[in-house]
Each structure stands twice: as structure tokens, then as C-alpha cells.
Image (cartoon, helix red, strand yellow):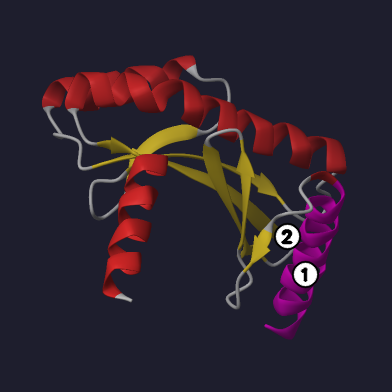
Amino acid sequence: MEENQEMIDSTSQKVREYLQEIYPDFVEFEDGSFTMQEGSATVSIIVRPWHQGDSAVEFTSHLVSGANITPELMRFLLTKNVELHFGALGLLFDDTIVYSHTLPGCDLSRKEFEATVRTVATIADYYDNEIVDMAGGKVASEAAEDINRELESMS
């Protein structure tokens, strides 16, 4: 167990260093996760245990919340998953539509890291408006603005 934690800590440090080089405005949270902005997309990054010999680095971007989850939308998401070279579109417990991709962490290179962040952000930015046009809801940036306005009105 201690060995796994050392791998996670080592991978998290590598992720932190890559973010400092590429996205110096990134945010690090107490739980060890990170977020960064690429264009209009926010990418969340978390390091998790995978197996005894490696960790996993998950890259996730929220695309749309509040969409009408229909069979047509599900078919669209599944069809796009076949077409996309890396990662997958999916649904969270609250029906938020996300795009995510995971890489092994122990040997993660800066080049792989940067390419993955940019890919996740680009795909999120490309498909979010298409999904809203098809199924309604709000793109993640609009939903975040709504939350910020709500918080400001409460203070």
C-alpha cells in the first residue's frame, strides 16, 4: 500500500511540474487533483492507483449539464466514441456529459501529457455546442457562470 502511495505521489509531482511549465495558472486542490483552462474548456486531472506497478492519470472535461438524455443523444455519444481515436464521451451520475481519457502515470512524458490535455480540451470545446444544439442544457462554462452568479448573490 505504501508503495502505491509513493507511485501516486511521484506521478502527482510529475503532473505538477508539467502544469507549472505549460499552464502556470493551474489550480491544485487539497485532494491532489488539478484543473487548468485551455480555451473555453476546463480540464480536470487526477492521479489514481491503477495496479501494483503503475498509477493512472485521468484527464476529464465537463461538456454539458442539464441536457435531455434521449436514446438519440446516447446513440450520438456512442457513435462518436467509436470515431474518436482516444478517450470517450460519457455520463456522470447527474447526467453531466463529459469527455475523458486516461494514461499510465509512471512513465508519463511531458509530450504525452501536453498532447492529452490539448486533445481533451479541443474535443470538449468542439462537441459541447453540438450536444447543446441536439439535446439542450448548458455548456460547462455557462453552467459555471450561473453558479458564480448564484454565489455572488448569496454574499
| Res 98 → quadrant | top left
Determine whether the residue tagged by mark 2 lies in a helix, strand or loop: strand
- The answer to which of 100 and 34 lies nearer the viewer is 34
The image shows residue 15, relative to residue 130, as above or below, that is: below
The image shows residue 72, relative to residue 117, as above or below, that is: above
Whether the magenta-drawn stretch holds residue 14 is answered as: yes
In whole angstroms, how far apart are the C-alphas of marks 2 and 1?
7 Å
Where does residue 46 sit, x and y in percent of width and height?
Answer: 60, 60
Determine whether the residue tagged by mark 1 lies in a helix, strand or loop: helix
| Res 111 → quadrant | top right
Dominant secondary-structure state across the stretch colored magenta: helix
Q: In the picture, which quadrant includes the N terminus? A: bottom right
Q: In the picture, which quadrant includes the C terminus? A: bottom left
Residue bearing mark 2: 54
Where does residue 81 sit, x and y in percent of width and height?
Answer: 42, 24
Residue bearing mark 1: 7
